Amino acid sequence: MRVGVLTGGGDCPGLNAVIRAVTKSLINHGQCEVLGIADGFEGLMDEKPRVKPLSWDEVSGILHIGGTILGTSNSANPLRDAATLEQVARNVKDLSLDVVVAIGGDGTMSLAHGLAQVGLQCVGVPKTIDNDIANCERSFGFDTAVTTVTESLRRIESTAMSHHRVMIVEAMGRHAGWLALESGIAGAADIILLPEIDYDLQAIVDFCKAREERQRYTIICIGEGAKESGQSLTVRERIEHSPDPVRLGGVAHVLRERLQPHLRSEVRATVLGHVQRGGDPTPFDRVLATQFGHHAAQLVLNGKFGHMVTLQNGRIGSVEIAKVANTQRTVPLDSPLLTMARDIGICFGEV
Ligand code: F6P
C-alpha cells in the first residue's frame, strides 16, 4: 500500500512525533511505502507533486522537535477550482497513493472530507494548540502551549508585583477559550477573559480597583477571541475586516486602552503570539502525538478511510471525518473548570 503523509494548517508542537509514529508503524507492518507530502495539500497541487519517500532513518531523531519536517501551509485549497482538483486527482493517480494521512485542524479535515468526494481517501489526525476540534478532548500541542503561556504568566507576575501594575496577557485560541482558561488557572491569573463569555468593562474595573487596595497588582489572561459585551465583532474579526490591519493591536491592547483611564495602577499588555506555537513538545504531547500517529496507521491498515483519530473519555478511537468537518469545540458554559475557577475567586468579567 502507498500511503501519503501531510501536515496542514498552522503548525503545532508534536507534528513530528505523529509523522514518526505513522511512518514507523506502517514500515514495521511491512508492505507499506510511505511518502511525505510537502506543505500540506499544496504539495499535491503542483504539476510536479512535491513528495519524498519517508524511510525509517528519515523519521528518526525527530520525536522531540517542534514544527514539522514536512512543512505546512495555511492557504492551500485543493478544492478552489476544477483545474486544481483535476491536478490533485492526477497526482494521486500517478503517485499510486491509496490513502493520505492528513494531520491538521478543522480546515484540513474539511479539505480531507471534500477530497474524498473526488476519490482521494484520507485518514485524519487532529492537531491544534487551540484544543477546539470536535470529538477530541485533548489535541497534542495544547499541553505544550499551556506550558508556554503558564510560564509567561509567571514571568509577567514578578514584574507586575514589582511595579504594582495591571498586566494583560493575550493567549491564542481563536474562537475557543481553552488555552486562556487552562493557562490562566495554571498561571494564577486573577482575571480570565474568554471568547465564550463576553466581558463587562465595569466588572473588570471594580475587580482591579479592589486589588489595588490589597495585592496592588493584577494579572489578566485574555483569549484572543474575547470581546466586550455590546461589541459585535471580536478584535480578531475587526483585524480581518480592517483595510489597515497592522494599526490595530491585539485584544490585550484594546482592553488596556479601555481600562487605563479608570485605574490608578499602570496597565501593560503583552501579546504572546507565535511563541505559543513554537518549541519542542512536552512529554505529554510526545506521548499523545505518538498514540495518535500509531492509531492513524491502524486505521490505514484496517482500511478505515474517511475517519479521524479521536480522544474521548481518555480513550483513543475514531470518528468519520464528515462528522467533524466544519465543527468546533468551545468551552461549555457549564464546564466544571469554569465553576471551580469562579469558586476560587477568579473573575471572568461577568456582570
Ligand atoms: O489555530 C491555531 C492558531 O495558532 C490560533 O490560535 C491563531 O488564531 C492562529 O492559529 C494564528 O494563525 P496564523 O499563524 O496564520 O497567524
Image: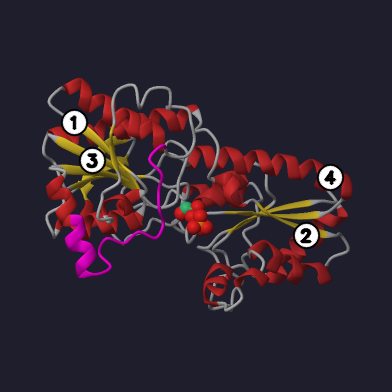
Secondary structure beneath label 2: helix
Name the side, left or right, on which 163 lies relative to 100.
right
Question: Of the residues under marks 3 and 4, which one precedes in the sequence?
Answer: 3
- Residue 33: image tag: 1
- Viewer-side label of 2, 1: 1
How far apart marks 1 and 4 lie (CA) works out to: 57 Å
Is the C-beta separation of discs 1 and 3 under 8 Å?
no
How far apart marks 1 and 3 lie (CA) works out to: 9 Å
**Disc 3 CB within 8 Å of nearest ligand 1 atom:** no
- Regarding residue 173, the answer to whether it shows in the image is no
Kind of residue sitting beneath label 2 = Cys
Question: Of the residues under marks 2 and 3, which one precedes in the sequence?
Answer: 3
> Which residue position is annotated with label 4?
161
Q: Which residues are magenta?
A: 69-88
Q: How is the image coloured?
A: secondary structure
Secondary structure beneath label 3: strand
Name the side, left or right, on which 18 lies relative to 159.
left
Name the quadrant of the N terminus. Answer: top left
Kind of residue sitting beneath label 1 = Glu
Please identify the dominant SS of the magenta region. Answer: loop
> Which residue position is annotated with label 3?
4
> Which residue position is annotated with label 2?
208
Kind of residue sitting beneath label 3 = Gly
- Viewer-side label of 2, 3: 3
